């Protein structure tokens, strides 16, 4: 069960990161990092949600 929950958190984080590239990058970027960190804490080896969240936040800073 832990494996499924870990991948669910990672999928949610990646989805939020992709949405954050289009709208509200700060909000969705932070959420993507949080969900990526939760997935990482549950044993996930994937960093895609965290990376997308950071890209969203950097994109927001640059576009200001």
Image (spheres, helix red, strand yellow):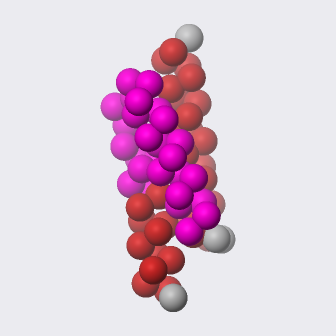
Which residues fall within the magenta stretch?
26-52
Quarter of the view holding residue 28: bottom right
For image coordinates 50% across by 26% down, the residue present is 6
- Residue 42 placement (x, y as % from top left): 44, 25
Residue, far left: 45
Q: Using the image, determine if residue 59 lies above or below residue 32.
A: below
Residue, far top: 1
Q: Is residue 15 left or right of residue 60?
A: right
Q: Is residue 41 left or right of residue 18?
A: left
- Residue 18 visible here: no
| Viewport quadrant of the N terminus | top right
Q: Using the image, determine if residue 29 lies above or below residue 58.
A: above
In-front residue for pair 18/42 = 42
Q: Is residue 60 magenta?
A: no
- Residue 51 placement (x, y as % from top left): 39, 54
For image coordinates 40% across by 33% down, the residue present is 40
For image coordinates 37% across by 37% down, the residue present is 46
- Residue 39 visible here: yes
For image coordinates 56% across by 23% down, the residue present is 5
Q: Main secondary structure of the magenta part?
A: helix
Residue, far bottom: 64
Q: Using the image, determine if residue 27 lies above or below residue 42.
A: below
Marks counted in the figure total 0
Q: Is residue 45 magenta?
A: yes
Q: Using the image, determine if residue 9 lies above or below residue 64.
A: above
């Amino acid at each position: 069960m832990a494996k499924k929950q870990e991948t669910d958190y990672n999928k949610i984080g990646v989805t939020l990161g992709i949405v954050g590239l289009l709208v509200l990058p700060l909000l969705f970027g932070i959420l993507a990092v949080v969900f990526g960190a939760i997935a990482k804490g549950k044993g996930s080896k994937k960093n895609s949600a965290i990376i997308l969240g950071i890209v969203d936040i950097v994109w927001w800073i640059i576009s200001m």
